[in-house]
Image (spheres, helix red, strand yellow):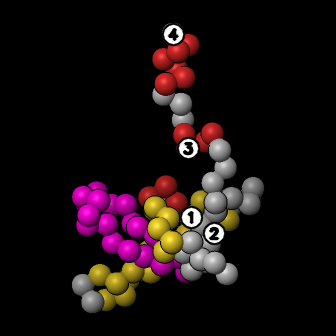
């Protein structure tokens, strides 16, 4: 019984991850196939009371138009980190 629980550990909360920052390039994980995820740029972060970033503002170009979105970070995948 204990062995099965070890096989399926929650990777999300076991180790701290890098916070998203302005200038990071991310994929927007929508209900589309992975090869169709649009690229987006983080333009603003919204830290919570405990200092962790849980929501960000992103900008993307879809169909030749610039679109702004507010997204939760678990709907984004970090592709390239900003080095500033």
Residue 68, horizontal then vertical, whole percent: 43, 80
CA–CA distance between discs 4 and 1? 37 Å
CA–CA distance between discs 4 and 3? 22 Å
The disc at residue 12 is 3
Q: Secondary structure beneath disc 2?
A: strand
Q: Are marks 1 and 2 in contact (CB under 8 Å)?
A: yes
Decide which of tag 2 and tag 3 comes sooner along the chain: 3
Seen in the image, is 57 located left or right of residue 45? left
- Depth check, mark 2 against mark 3: the one in front is 3
The structure residue drawn at horizontal position 38% and vertical position 74%, both measured from the top left corner, is: 39
The structure residue drawn at horizontal position 33% and vertical position 61%, both measured from the top left corner, is: 30
The disc at residue 46 is 2
Decide which of tag 4 and tag 3 comes sooner along the chain: 4
Who is closer to the viewer here, 80 or 62? 80
How many other residues sit within 10 Å of disc 4, few (<14), some (14-19) or many (≥20)?
few
Q: Can residue 56 be spotted in the picture?
A: yes
The structure residue drawn at horizontal position 47% and vertical position 68%, both measured from the top left corner, is: 79
Q: Can residue 44 be spotted in the picture?
A: no
CA–CA distance between discs 2 and 3? 20 Å
Residue assigned mark 4: 1
CA–CA distance between discs 4 and 2? 41 Å
């Amino acid at each position: 019984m204990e062995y099965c629980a070890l096989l399926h550990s929650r990777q999300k909360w076991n180790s701290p991850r890098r916070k998203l920052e302005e200038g990071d390039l991310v994929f927007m994980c929508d209900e589309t196939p992975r090869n169709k995820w649009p690229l987006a740029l983080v333009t603003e972060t919204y830290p919570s009371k405990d200092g962790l970033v849980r929501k960000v503002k992103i900008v993307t170009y879809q169909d030749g138009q610039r679109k702004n979105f507010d997204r939760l970070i678990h709907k984004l995948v970090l592709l390239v980190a900003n080095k500033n």
